Amino acid sequence: MMAFLRMAARALVVVTALLPAVTLADSSLNMRQGVTTLSREIYDLHMLITWVCVVIGVVVFGLMFYSIFKHRKSAGAKAAHFHENVTIEVLWTVIPFLILVGMAIPATRTLLAIEDSGDPDITIQVTGYQWKWKYDYLDHDIGFFSNLATPPEQINNTQEKSEHYLLEVDNPMVVPVNKKIRFLITSNDVIHSFWSPDLGVKRDAVPGFINASWATIDEPGIYRGQCAELCGINHGFMPVVIDARSEADFNSWVADQKQAVVAAQQAAEETWTMERLMQQGAEVYGRACVACHQVTGMGVPGAFPALDGSAIAIGPLEAHLEIVMQGKTGTAMQAFAAQLSDSDLAAVITYERNSWSNATGDAVQPAQVKAAR
């Protein structure tokens, strides 16, 4: 008995010691109300159904406990014998039916609103990739990839984690407030799930299919979400970040994006120095390649191959270009031809061929990438 008590005391000490760590997690007991009319309607429906369930629970268990106490054998109660009571059978059929109908009416109204993505002010195609998102603004002819921006040092626990650990990106989705935004959601590879709790949006991204959703954001701000489908080894590394701005700020951002596209096209016509290629290549590698091949270029044994000293990175340039641009079937190596510009591809391939112990001296130019397309 004493041994058992000592073991229980030790277990209590361990649990007590872990409590501060547990309380670091979000202790909220309810869903968010969100910043859109739709998200608040979903929240109100959730609360209505919750309170209906609470009332049913209180009534049913209250009657049950009352009956157990009032009609207990020790108080001299004797069980009544009856069956085929039409009144009782009608009541326990009609009352649940009325409750279900009462819940179905607001639920149907909300579900119809969720599916009503027609007449949008702006349409954005959201495409899931392993492990990033691509946003194409169909009304403005611009598009870009959104990659995880959390430094590898934080992921590897060599640096203190930031406030928005694993929930920060290099290019957030920028949208205007007070405009109906339609999301056309699909995938390039496996099933993902586009989820933004503040917007009340959650839709699966399925290869070969397009699922529609929508939102009208009332307040400017940064709203974060994640991929909510287990989509592979780096599933937790593809956050959703939405930057809602005023209409004037959004229009200014669109103009800047179009200018950036023109500047990138002009840069691709230039001859780049090795220094410029290496600098740009390090940036591209950090957002597109580091998750699999690591900062050190050593990869992940058994999962992702090393680039340091690999036959691809120090072998024929044509083979290196082909695998980066076209990917490798049957592996996690994606085709980056449609994901990166000629300049970015030239820079990252140059970086891979001249980093770590690799020293080929090759300076790949955007024109070479363009020719390889």
Image (tube, rainbow, N blue to C red):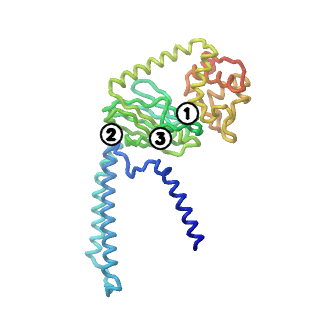
Q: Earlier in the sequence, mark 1 or mark 3?
A: 1
Q: Residue at x 58, y 21 (%)?
A: 280
Nearer to us in this view, 150 or 206: 150
Could you tell me residue 201's position as x and y percent?
40, 42
Which residue lies most toward the left here? 87
Q: Residues within 10 Å of mark 3 (few under 14, many from 20)?
A: many
Cα separation between marks 1 and 2 = 31 Å
Q: Earlier in the sequence, mark 2 or mark 3?
A: 2
SS category of the residue bearing label 3? strand
Q: Quadrant of residue 275?
A: top right
Q: Residue at x 32, y 42 (%)?
A: 38
Cα separation between marks 2 and 3 = 18 Å
Reading the image, the residue beneath label 2 is 36
Instruction: Establish if 12 lies above or below 371.
Output: below
Could you tell me residue 248's position as x and y percent?
33, 23
User: Which amino acid lies under the numbered mark 3 shown in the image of this protein?
Assistant: Gln
Reading the image, the residue beneath label 1 is 151
User: Which amino acid lies under the numbered mark 1 shown in the image of this protein?
Assistant: Pro
Q: Residue at x 71, y 28 (%)?
A: 312
- Left/right placement of residue 80 relative to residue 6 reads left
User: Which amino acid lies under the numbered mark 2 shown in the image of this protein?
Assistant: Thr
Q: Residues within 10 Å of mark 1 (few under 14, many from 20)?
A: some
Reading the image, the residue beneath label 3 is 226
SS category of the residue bearing label 1? loop
